[in-house]
Image (cartoon, coloured by chain):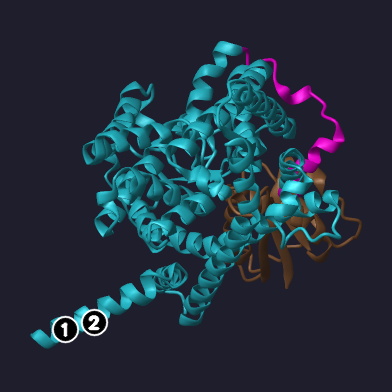
Amino acid sequence: MDQILLTINMVSQGFANNILVKPEFFIGILVFIGYMLLGKPIYEAFGGFIKAAVGMMIWNVGSGGLVTTFRPILSGLNDRFALHAAVIDPYFGLNAASEAIKSIGMSLSWTMISLMVGFAWNILLVLFRKQTKIRTLFLTGHIMIQQATTCTWLVFFAIPALRNIQGAMWIGILVGTYWAVFSNLTVEPTQKLTDNSGFAVGHQQMGWVWLASKLAPKFGSPKHTVENVKFPRWLTMFNDNVIATGTLMLVFFGVIMSILGEPYLRGIDKAGFPPNLAFATYILSKSLLFAVYLFILISGVRMFVAELTESFRGISEKILPGSLPAVDCAATYGFSSPNTVLFGFVFGCLGQFLAIAGLFIFKIPILIITGFVPVFFDNATTAVFANKFGGIRAAGILAFCTGMIQVAGGAFAAWYFELYTYGGWHGNIDWDTIWPLIGVIMKNFAMPGMILVIVAMLMIPQIQYRNSSDKENYFKIEAD
Amino acid sequence: MLKVVAACGNGMGSSQIIKMKIDKIFKKLNMPVEIHHMSVGEAKAAASGYDVVFCSIAFVDIFSVKNNRTKVIGLKNLLSETEIETKIRENLTVSDEGRD
C-alpha cells in the first residue's frame, strides 16, 4: 500500500516538475489525448503533439522578443514623463498577462487547465440546455487562449488565495460561463444578419454585438446602409494584418521615440543603437520589430491552436450534435458589403484617436497605443451589426463610440490590473467594459464576488429565454 | 492532388473553420486535397502556388492572380457545406464516380 502511494506521489511530483512547468508539453499532451479520443491513428496524434509543442515554443520566442524590444521604450516613457504605455491588442495583452503570470512564479499550464475546464463547462451548460437556456458552444480556439490567459491573470491578481489548482478550476468556470452566456446572447442578432445561417459569434465583442443590435435602430434606419459608400483604394491595404500592424506601430512608436529623443535613446539602448546608426533607421527598425515579433508570436499561437481546435471540434461534434457553434466574428463579414468592414475601421480609429488625445488633455498617466486587432475586428463587427439594424448612421456613431470606450476602458484596465508594467492590455471591447467590471468586483469581494459574477451571468440566458418572442424555436436552430 | 488554401483576416479564426468544412466536402466528393490556412496577406503572396483559394467574399477583390491555374472562391456563409459544395462544383471538375 505504501509502495503504491509512494509511486503515485513520485509520478505526480514528476508531472508537476516536468510537465506542468513546461506548458508546451502540457498542451502537446492534451492534443495527443484529444486525437486518441477521436480515434485518430497514433502517428497523427504524435504529429499533433509535435505541432502543438513547437507552436507554443515559437510563441515563447515571439513573446521574449516583444519584451526585449519594449523594455527600453517603456522604461524611457516612465523615466522621462512618468507615463505608462499599453498597447491595446489581444496579442500584446496575451503577452502582458503571460509575463505577469510568470512573474508571480506561476506556470502557463494553469492557463491551459482553465481553458480545458472552461471548454468542458461550456459543453455541460449546453448539455443541460433545457435548464440553462444556453445553446452555443464557443469554438474559436485562439480567442479562448487569449481570454483564458487574461482571465487567469485577473483572478490570480484579484484573489491571491486562488493561485493553485482550485483556482485554475474556478477560472475555467468563470471564463466558460462568459463563453457560453455571451455567445448565446449573439444568437438572435446573428441569425437575423445571416438569414438563419446557424452560427453565433464567439469572439471578443459578444456583449457589444448584442448591445449594438439593440441600440442601432435608435440611431438610424436600416434603409440607408453603408453599401453605396466608396472608399479610396489604399485603405484596403489595412486588410493585411502585417501591413496594418507595421504601420500602426511605426506611427505610434515613431512619435514616442521622436519625443524621447535621440540622445536619450542612445543612452539607454546602447546595444540596439550603435553610434553609426541614424536615428531614422533606428526608429524604423525598432517599430517594425514589433510587427516582426508579433508575427512570430501569432504564428506560434496559430500552430498550436490549429491542433487544439481540431480536437475541440471533434470532441464537441461527438458529445454535442445540434449545438450551435460560436465562431470568429469575421464569419459575419460575408453578410455585409466589404465597405462596412472598412467603414467600422475608419470610424473606430477616429474614436480611438480622439480618446487618446483626451488622455493627454486630462493628463492621465497612462498612454494607450492603438493595436490592430481591436480597432479592426471590434469596430468592423460593430459596424456590420449596426448597419444591419440601424443603417449607415448607426454604423458610424456606434463604431466611433466603440473606439472611444476601447481607449478609456483599456487605460483603466491596464492601470488597475497592473499590466502596464508589461506594456499591453487585451483591448477588445468586452475586455474594456464587462471584464474590468468583473475584475473590480473580484478584487473587492474576493471569492463571494466571483461567485456572484458567475451566478449573475447565468441569469442572462434565463431572461433572454423569457423575453424570446419565439420560444418554440428557441432550441431548434441547427447548422446545416 | 489539389493544393488548396483557406484565407481570412488573421489566418486563424474563420480560415480554420473554412479549412475543416472544405476538407469534409472534398472527402465527400472523393477529391484528394492538401489544405493550408493562412492570413489574407500571406495568401495574397502565396496564391499563385495554389489551385484554389477560399476566402470570405469580402476579400475576393484583394487577390489578383495572373495565371490560368488558381481559382479564387469567395464564400458568403463560411459554415455552409451546401454553399461550399455548390461553389466547388461550379469552379472545379468534379467526377461523380465512386460517390455513395
The residue under label 2 is which amino acid type? Answer: Met
Name the residue nearer the viewer: A451 or A206: A451
Image quadrant occupied by the N terminus of chain B: bottom right
User: Where, by quadrant of the figure, is residue B51 drawn?
Assistant: bottom right
Left/right placement of residue A263 relative to residue A208 reads right
Indicate the position of residue A282 as horizontal and vertical percent values. Answer: 80, 53
Left/right placement of residue A114 relative to residue B51 reads left
- Supply the letter of whichever chain is cyan: A
Q: Is disc 1 on the same chain as disc 2?
A: yes
- Shown colour of chain B: brown
Name the residue furthest left. A1
Name the residue nearer the viewer: B29 or A266: A266
Q: What's the chain of the residue with tag 2?
A: A
Mark 1 crowdedness (10 Å alpha carbons): few <14, some 14-19, many ≥20: few
Residue A10 has which mark?
Answer: 2
Q: Is the C-beta separation of discs 2 and 1 under 8 Å?
A: yes
Give, as a single range, the part of the protein colored magenta.
Answer: A220-243
In the picture of the structure, the residue carrying the numbered disc 1 is A6
User: Any magenta on residue A226?
Assistant: yes
